[in-house]
Image (cartoon, helix red, strand yellow):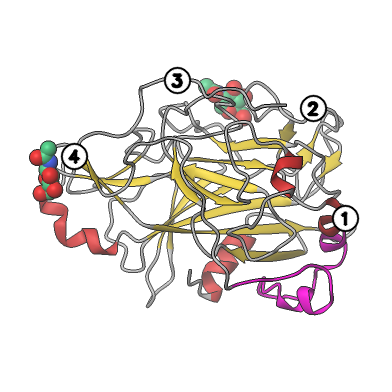
Amino acid sequence: MKSSPSVLYILTATVSAEAFWVMNMKNVLITERVDPVSSPGAIAPHVHTVIGGSNFGPYATSEDLRASKCTSGPIVEDKSNYWTPTLYFQWTNRSFTSVEGTVSVKYLFNPGEAIPFPDDFRMLAGSPTSRSKNESDSTPDETFLCLNPLAQASRHSVLPALQCPGGLRSQVTFPSCWDGKNLDSDSHKVHVAFAADGKCTDPAYPVNLPQIQVEAHWDTTEFYSLTKHALNPEQPFVFSNGDATGCNFYAAFLNGWETKVLKQAIDKCTCGMYGDAKCCADAGIFTIDTTSQCRITPHVEEQVQGTLGHLPGKAFDCFSPPDD
Ligand SMILES: *[C@@H]1O[C@H](CO)[C@@H](O)[C@H](O)[C@H]1NC(C)=O
Ligand SMILES: *[C@@H]1O[C@H](CO)[C@@H](O)[C@H](O)[C@H]1NC(C)=O
């Protein structure tokens, strides 16, 4: 994951947080049709690229996640999971080939103002269902960056019909104001709201949480020479939920933090001007491990990567409940 300072400027200008750190995920934990937020206990309707704690699963709770053996993220005390739909390239014959991705997660906060996420807190950001952009929505939470190592990245509200020499980044910003009561809601969205000028002034959403940004960086570069064999040569990519516009891109979060460590971090981790959290690890706030990879075996046995005749999904099935 490469970010030039100009790209960081674009990103941090969208929220008025005083401090942030970046977690470049070491690897993708799993790519599969599981989603403990939108499809608890069931096989999800589409494939997700999942990162974070190894106890990810259809019934995962915060307690389960904290007991994970490892995390694919660099901060050992964060066993949360974060996931987004997976990107595919679509051929003229309507087959799909998966695009490799890496993920980074940013935490933005005003030190001392935010509180840690409560146990079993979960949420979703982006628009998993609407088939078009809501123009009157002043806080569109998902954006796309066309990356170019030699120039400033261009920013788009939908998947750009451009060849991006540095790959394509899809990113989602989560709201940072909580209603203080509900750990989740039917839409997984309405228990939280975006801040106004960085402050949680709406009395319905008074509690300030750290703001999460999930950035999926897709290695689209190898596909540009193949666009003449693409169903849509202008914009050949499709997300696992069938979305070829980007309007339905979203990310989900399930809290697996060690609460005391997150509290320390959002009070004190202010030393990394460009988001490098190493100084916070040096100060004993959390532990960083950037080397050991973390992967799990799939819960759903099906091919989801490589070249596929159709996008995995449509089938609906249930897992057996966990033994208590
Ligand atoms: C469609 O085309 C791709 C690329 O040539 C190929 O890999 C794939 O096997 C084809 N799919 C079918 C169903 O023929
Ligand atoms: C569009 O966004 C506005 C402002 O957030 C909201 O009030 C409205 O209900 C949304 N419309 C749709 C169709 O989602």
Total numbered badges shown on the rendered structure: 4
**How far, Cα to Cα, is label 4 from label 2?**
42 Å
Amino acid type, residue under disc 2 in the picture: Asn
In front: mark 1 or mark 3? 3
Any part of residue 288 in sight: yes
Q: Are marks 4 and 2 in contact (CB under 8 Å)?
A: no
Q: Residues within 10 Å of mark 3 (few under 14, many from 20)?
A: few
| Segment colored magenta | 264-290
Based on the displayed image, in which of its 4 quarters is residue 132 positioned? Answer: top left
Q: Quadrant of the C terminus?
A: top right
**Residue 193 counted in the magenta span:** no
- Is 319 placed left or right of 96 in the picture? right
**Residue tagged by mark 1?**
260
In this picture, residue 295 sits left or right of residue 162 = right
Which disc, if any, is residue 317? 3
Question: Considering only order in the chain, which callout, 2 or 4, is on the residue closer to the N terminus?
Answer: 4
Q: Main secondary structure of the magenta part?
A: loop
Pointer 1 or 2: first along the chain: 2
The answer to which of marks 1 and 3 sits earlier in the sequence is 1
Residue at 46% over, 40% down: 249
Q: Earlier in the sequence, mark 4 or mark 1?
A: 4
- Whole-percent x, y for residue 15 in the image: 68, 54
Residue 57 in the image: state x and y as whole percent. 58, 37
Q: Nearer the viewer, residue 238 or 83?
A: 83
Crowd around label 4: few <14 · some 14–19 · many ≥20 (10 Å) = some
Disc 1 and disc 2: Cα gap in Å?
21 Å
